[in-house]
Amino acid sequence: MNNISTKDTYVLIMAGGVGSRFWPKSRNNFPKQFIDILGIGKSLLQLTHERFLKICPPENIFILSNEQYSGLVAEQLPSLPKENIIAEPSRNNTAPCIAYASFKISQLNTHARIVVAPSDHLILNEAVFLEKIQQALSYVEGKDALVTLGISPTRPDTGYGYINYNKIEVDGVHQVLRFLEKPNLEKAKEFVASGDYLWNAGIFVWSVGSILTALEKYSPDIFKLFEKGVSCYNTPDEKSFISENYPLSDNISIDYAIMEKADNVFTIPGDFGWSDLGTWASLYEVVEKDEHNNVFSGYTINLSETTNCMIQIPKDKVAVVKGLDNYIVVDDGKVLLIYPKANEQEIKEVSKAIVAKCGEEFA
């Protein structure tokens, strides 16, 4: 790939989420991004890190996560410099951690262009994805622009936010008209039929100057809080400053804090085999199935009269499954989940009820 100024390209990989809809496989102490959910010997975080090594030097990749997961990040990415693990002392959503990392990067390189991406998404067509990222990086060079990658919708999905965009393009880049929250089914059908909407994947590209300017304008409290630490970033004083001040920041997403307010937001539509892998059913949709449309991993025998199921069993356990259709079966060794795939949206609440009844060890 023909990279431009790779030394000025930085990547922030967001890896602090819990992934509660993948319970019981994804738990508070070992969430989705650290799991080999695809059964290929690599976690989603490892796959994401490898992907971005193709567009910037390894020292320019930062992992944004909770302090709780610093050890897991270091274990799964042993080549990552320890100082590139940005550990949040509290869970305050995405705006504060992006602000913190942006100030930190600004002290390293005032010409930095930053890619922000989740750690737990699936990209099937990596070449097209990286091409779109490079296109966005080129676009923000020398411009005060905030770019988001939009996903061409393949169905009227109610689980995603949507981007309403101007169909007029300049070099493949479109002005964003507005962001919309997750719609009901009728609205989702309207959005897809109109051709004027994209799925919001939460993948952003901007210059460090543009994001700091946007923070100052639209989230001044967050900007002022982290601006106070300018002299501390990338020094031994950084940790104590962050420990004291980070928990004081607003608990707000970057979408609410910046993207929905700014008037310099653009999108690049893409179709690169994207899934946010937000649920068991979304994983089921993208992985290879057997002749009965089952997806299974582990040592499973006597899988008969069973169709359209997602089954995950530990490799040291034998399962005998017969007569199931359209079910999720997940055994993580401590919890066994057998649940209709059609009702998987209930799993998050079910997990809360189990934790309330049985204790935090099941969270």
Image (cartoon, helix red, strand yellow):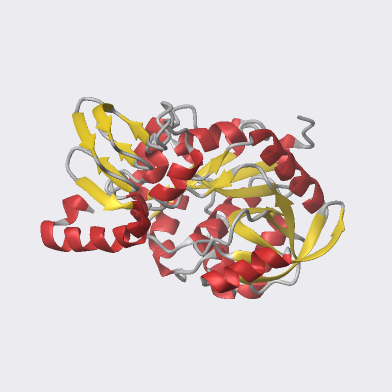
Residue 211 placement: quadrant: bottom right
Label total for image: 0
Q: In this orientation, does residue 224 appear? A: no
> In this image, 140 relative to 271: left or right?
right
As drawn, the residue found furthest toward the left would be 358
As drawn, the residue found furthest toward the front would be 305
Residue drawn at (72%, 53%), measured in percent from left and top?
Answer: 269
Q: Where does the image place residue 170, in percent across and percent down from the top left?
A: 87, 57
Q: Quadrant of the C terminus?
A: bottom left
Vertical position of residue 99 compared to residue 47: above or below: below
Q: Where does the image place residue 328, in percent across and percent down from the top left?
A: 31, 46
Residue drawn at (39%, 48%), measured in percent from left and top?
Answer: 280
Residue drawn at (49%, 62%), measured in percent from left and top?
Answer: 159
> In this image, 274 relative to 277: left or right?
right
Q: Quadrant of the N terminus?
A: top right
Front-lying residue, 66 or 212: 66
Front-lying residue, 338 or 164: 338
Residue 59 placement: quadrant: top right
Vertical position of residue 64 compared to residue 230: above or below: above
Front-lying residue, 244 or 207: 207
